[in-house]
Amino acid sequence: MVFRCRQKKGKVCGAPGAAYLFFITLSLFAAVATADAGAAEEVRSLSRERTWQVLMHYRQQGDRFTSLIDDPKFFLAPQGKTDPQAELNASLEALLLPVEIDDEHFRCRFPARAEWLISVYNLNDLALPQPHCGKLNETLTSVDPRSVVLVFPAAHNNGPASMFGHTLLRVGSSYKSPLLSAAVNYAANDTDSNGLLYAFKGIFGFYPGYFALLPYYEKLNDYSGVEHRDIWEYTLNLSPEESRRLMLHTWELQSISSDYYFFDENCSFMLLFLLEAARPELRLAQEYWERRSFWVIPVDTIASIRRAGLITDVTYRPAQATRIRHRASLLNEQGRQRAFAVAMQQEPAHVPTLPQNSREEERQILDLAAEYVQYRYSRQELPAEEFRPQFLSILKVRSQLGPGEVDVEQIPTPEQPEAGHEAGRISFGGGNEGHGPFLELSWRPAYHDLLDPDEGYTQGAQINFFALKTRYRLDEEDFRLQSFRPVDILSLAPRDLFFQPISWKVNFGIERLRLADESEPLAFTLNTGGGLAWELPAKTLGYLMVEGQVNATDRLRENVEIGGGVSIGAISRLHPRWKAHLAASVLTYLPERHSHYRLLFDQNFKVTRLSGITIRTNWEERYHQSQLGATAAYNWYF
């Protein structure tokens, strides 16, 4: 169906009259309203087109469609969320409506949809209503979309909202500095500072999620400076025209809400639709639906995008905290102490005449002090009126020493996040404990524990969700549920002179509890605590925690017992393929008035990126009865 405008003498082509618009409208909908079954089927088939489904975020299940967008403002038809044909018809009708308010016309509000409809129906653009899209044009001019970069702020194990990392897009322009680019971000609109409340509401979709267009330097400062998170930038091979289409669809989604789900419809998954809008032949979201995945973890989407052949280059931007730690590692203890003292104004910045400090060492000391002052200012620990004179005084003294001889900016680049193991894990093995030998099968859909290989993950972070463990006891021919933990989080954030984070843990679920009569009923357990962690020699992370635990089962005398105590441990990377965890704990319970002592030594041997072997040994004493156990298991990551 082709509509062309013939220019008449004395009349500008493209000034549509009411009769001409009526003719277009009548022609477009005649196929649906008449008995022309073939044309009607053609119109219906367009609602099943890949591009239309992407632009509307439709998910197809059999013959049914549902859009992942929940905001009714996104749909023009009342049933548009579930009826692609009705939404297509309504969009066509809106495209042809005369202009009443420029920026509110369909072509201004939904430019990606409008361009696609004009293209597939081969309409003459100039013969259609011509609204002045001032806000859209201003944004396109400001953003100047030429390229797209996928940005991954790495996980930060001391923040519940950033345990998995995050993804956003940087829309590159003709400007020289990437910092002047625009960032496209999708995130939950939350105001909760409580980590547990955030996790609960995020898991069950109680937050609305919104797309936002922001200056990239603002997001870079938030993640790299304030939140201690390293930044990975993945350059994508999208053309300028594809980048423009992505920007048009982003415009359509502004101020449009969708229910935010922590595990699937999250920051990473929703961004996939923007990439598909740029290049509709991509099927990034479809990959997760086809494998019926319940989890969409940011690092997994990076791997999906790499498999699709989109990534051409990778850039690593260390966080300010990473740079500070690197600078500090190049100095001895005395140098670190002096840099800290200068930064905290415990002593003035000056060039000492002490022979033990070379000029190069002094440069590094002052550079470290200056960067730490900047860091404290970015964290709002230092007001502006104190920051400026202090920072300038350090730079003034530093300028007297000239350029440095050592390139301290060459920070070692860690493994790329997507190079690590997959988030899911199935383990099969066996062992002997208490009642005799057993076979054991465990399943963890996400994400990482202390013994898993560190490549691509944050050291000291354990984040397991819905971990299930079953056993078959050979002597008694008894198959049983051993434990089920919906949440198991341990954050070991190392402390040093410059950073003083608090480590913490929380886990809950059901597990077997050994009682005084040697029975092992299932009990509800809740364990939480806080403490300190330090980096020790030989790639070892040590920690000390104060813990509390609640156990509940009708087999206890009072149905519930409450305990408290301490745990101490060390996790060491003995070899690139060998990790070990040694830990001891003691908890004293009331009203049962007994203590639980435990000592464990666990090891993990990496076989390949997707497999490994775990050996666990433990000794424990409850109700003055001790028990020794050992388990060996083969792990497969999926």
Image (cartoon, helix red, strand yellow):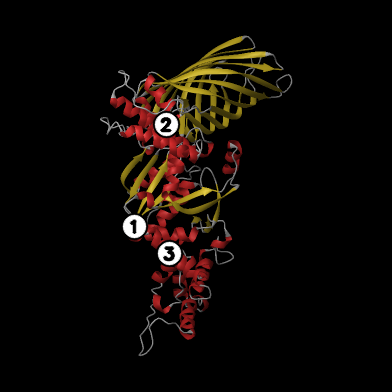
In the rendered structure, find residue 460 and report the number of the disc placed on it: none
Q: Amino acid at mark 2?
A: Trp
Which residue is tagged 3? Answer: 138
Q: Is residue 396 left or right of residue 403?
A: right
43 or 200, nearer to the observer? 200
Which residue is tagged 2? Answer: 636
Tell me the element at label 3: helix
Q: Residue at x 73, y 19 (%)?
A: 557
Which residue is tagged 1? Answer: 146
Q: Is residue 320 left or right of residue 565?
A: left
Where residue 304 sits: x, y (%)? 39, 45
- Between circles 1 and 3, the one closer to the viewer is 3
353 or 610, nearer to the observer? 353
Residue 169, compared with residue 509, is above or below; it is below
Residue 331, compared with residue 207, is above or below; it is above
Where residue 603 sits: x, y (%)? 43, 20
